[in-house]
């Protein structure tokens, strides 16, 4: 099985092609070792999209999620950061509410 993954570790956003060959996870397209680690983690399900809700200044509940999977070890930190996000005015699906939330490499965006 092959999987295409966007590395979110830096602004280069390398397109990774990851596949399992025997016992080995092979990553192609990474420009540095961080992409190798990131590709392997996401392929193995060690990275996840974080989802949650924020409240607008008018009390509306707004579904949000990260723009890319983040390492499972970052989920708690991202969840805490989501709770601190303030929304003023009207937002639409896809709007970025916080760039690089909790230094995770992913942005926080408004869901559908
Ligand atoms: S592979 Fe390296 S250079 Fe490419 S996006 Fe990931 S961290 Fe950046």
Image (cartoon, rainbow, N blue to C red):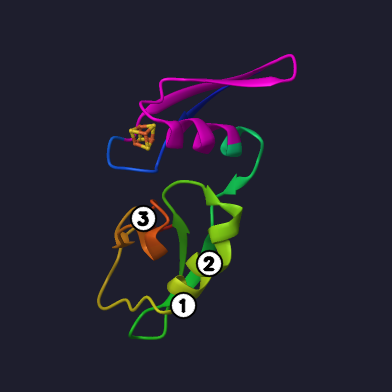
Secondary structure under tag 2 reads: strand
28 or 107, nearer to the observer: 28
For the view shown, which residue lies furthest in the right direction?
23
- Please tell me whether mark 2 or mark 3 is closer to you in this view: 3
State the residue at coordinates (41%, 25%).
30
Residue where numbered disc 1 is placed: 83
Q: Are marks 2 and 1 in contact (CB under 8 Å)?
A: yes
Stretch of the chain drawn in magenta: 13-40
Per the image, label 1 sits on a secondary structure element best described as helix
Q: Position of residue 64 (x, y in %)?
A: 45, 62
Quarter of the image where one finds residue 45:
top right
Residue 25 on the magenta span: yes
C-alpha separation, residue under disc 2 versus residue under disc 3: 13 Å
| Residue found 56% across the figure and 61% down from its top | 75
Crowd tier of the residue under label 1, counting other residues whose Cα lies within 10 Å: few below 14, some 14–19, many 20 or above? few
Q: Is residue 73 magenta?
A: no
Q: Is residue 95 left or right of residue 34?
A: left
Residue 50, image x and y in percent?
Answer: 54, 58
Disc number for residue 45 = none
Q: Earlier in the sequence, mark 2 or mark 3?
A: 2
């Amino acid at each position: 099985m092959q999987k295409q993954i966007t590395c979110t570790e830096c602004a280069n956003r390398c397109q990774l092609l990851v596949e399992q060959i025997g016992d080995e996870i092979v990553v192609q397209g990474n420009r540095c070792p961080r992409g190798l680690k990131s590709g392997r983690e996401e392929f193995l399900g060690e990275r996840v999209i974080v989802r949650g809700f924020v409240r607008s200044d008018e009390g509306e509940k707004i579904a949000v999620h990260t723009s890319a999977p983040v390492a499972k070890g970052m989920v708690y930190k991202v969840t805490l950061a989501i709770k601190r996000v303030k929304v003023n005015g009207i937002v639409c699906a896809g709007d970025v509410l916080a760039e690089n939330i909790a230094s995770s490499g992913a942005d926080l965006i408004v869901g559908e």
